Image (spheres, rainbow, N blue to C red):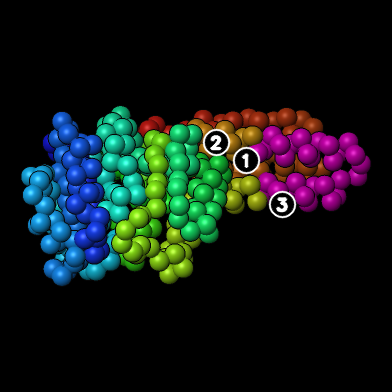
Amino acid sequence: MRPRLISVVLPVYNEGENIAECLRRLDRALKGVEHEILVCYDFDEDTTLPAIRAMGDLSPTVKLTRNTIGRGAPNAIRTGFRAATGDVVVTTMADLSDPPEVIPQMAAAIRAGNAVVSGSRYMPGGSQTGGPLIKRTMSRVAGRLLHDLAGLGTRDATTNFRAYAAEYLARTEIESKRGFEIALELTVKAQQMGLGVSEVPSSWTDRSAGQSNFKLWKWLPNYLHWFWVAMRQPLACTGLALLLATAGLVQAPDSGQRSLIALLFLVTLSVLLLARRLRNRNTWIDLFHPVCWLAPVLVSAPSLLLLLAAVPSGALLLATRPRRQS
């Protein structure tokens, strides 16, 4: 049993201009809360280290943690995960972009039963200030698609301002090795394991000092991989429904038949949405629903068969409704 403690993982790369203020803000925000701050660095020449040693008010909760896995952001974060001793692990950046005051709310949401909680810029109450337009746009659109179509429990899928249940991290293999897509990977995997994914409103402000190490075009393929992992099953279900409905409309002999097909297409989409709400995502087994509701039209089945479509479709919804894992 891990102690009731928040482990803040802070990956750094030459953050000498920001680290002192970052650590002071974290200390103020977590005053009265059991916590540790793990500053994860790659090499001894990092400008972050002398800036920390020069602090006269350095909190005893700050621990310097050398990354021995291999250089790079995901390895620094993984090093922090391994060194963390708390029941809640929070990742945040040292560039002063994330508000540390939100961390206690994120930890509370983890202790309420979620595996992953996002500090969300894009939910009501969240905000974003600054940053490249193309990066902001891609992040917002991806988050909206993953939330609305794939059922991901956060509208902000790409932020690394995340809280994780330590037990979830301990049993989950991390595949990311190059960029900050590690947060998206862990969020998608939690959803597909049937674990809770949630969010709390947060703000994000672009750094005012130092240089960003985010490499959008270099890391974009890695983000797209996990985006596709989350989207492929709901897209396949919706795509099959659209394909069957289109085929039915093409061969429909009259307007009455076309109206029936349009109605059944809407019913199918509603059933897929219900399936997603029941288990937080669509799976390959949900391909049965479009077949059940729309295939009978293609073979000119009698109306009774269409009516009976509700029986196997409804039975499948009940049979595949999961129990929430803890």
The residue under label 1 is which amino acid type?
His
Image vertical order of residue 46 relative to residue 171, above or below:
below
Name which of mark 3 and mark 1 comes first in the sequence: 3
* Disc on res. 289: 1
Magenta region includes residue 259: yes
Q: Please give left or right for residue 174 compared with residue 61 in the image.
A: right
Q: Is the C terminus in the top left, top right, bottom left or bottom right quadrant?
A: top left
Foreground pick, 64 / 152 = 64
Foreground pick, 126 / 159 = 126
Q: Is the N terminus in the top left, top right, bottom left or bottom right quadrant?
A: top left
Mark whose residue sits in front, 3 or 1: 3
Name the residue at 45% across, 55% down. 131
Residue 19, image quadrant: bottom left
Q: State the image coordinates of residue 310 (x, y, percent, origin top left).
A: 66, 30
- Per the model, the C-alpha gap separating discs 3 and 1 is 13 Å
Residue hosting label 2: 275
Residue hosting label 3: 243
**Is the Cβ of the residue at disc 2 closer than 8 Å to that at disc 3?**
no
Residue 260, image quadrant: top right
Foreground pick, 115 / 258 = 115
**Is the Cβ of the residue at disc 2 closer than 8 Å to that at disc 1?**
yes
Q: Please give left or right for residue 316 compared with residue 241 in the image.
A: left
Q: State the image coordinates of residue 31 (x, y, percent, origin top left).
A: 17, 34
Do we see residue 212 in this rendering?
yes
Q: State the image coordinates of residue 9 (x, y, percent, origin top left).
A: 22, 50
Mark whose residue sits in front, 2 or 1: 2
The residue under label 2 is which amino acid type?
Ala
Magenta-highlighted residues = 240-269
- Per the model, the C-alpha gap separating discs 2 and 1 is 10 Å
Name which of mark 2 and mark 3 comes first in the sequence: 3
- Per the model, the C-alpha gap separating discs 2 and 3 is 20 Å
Name the residue at 60% across, 43% down. 288
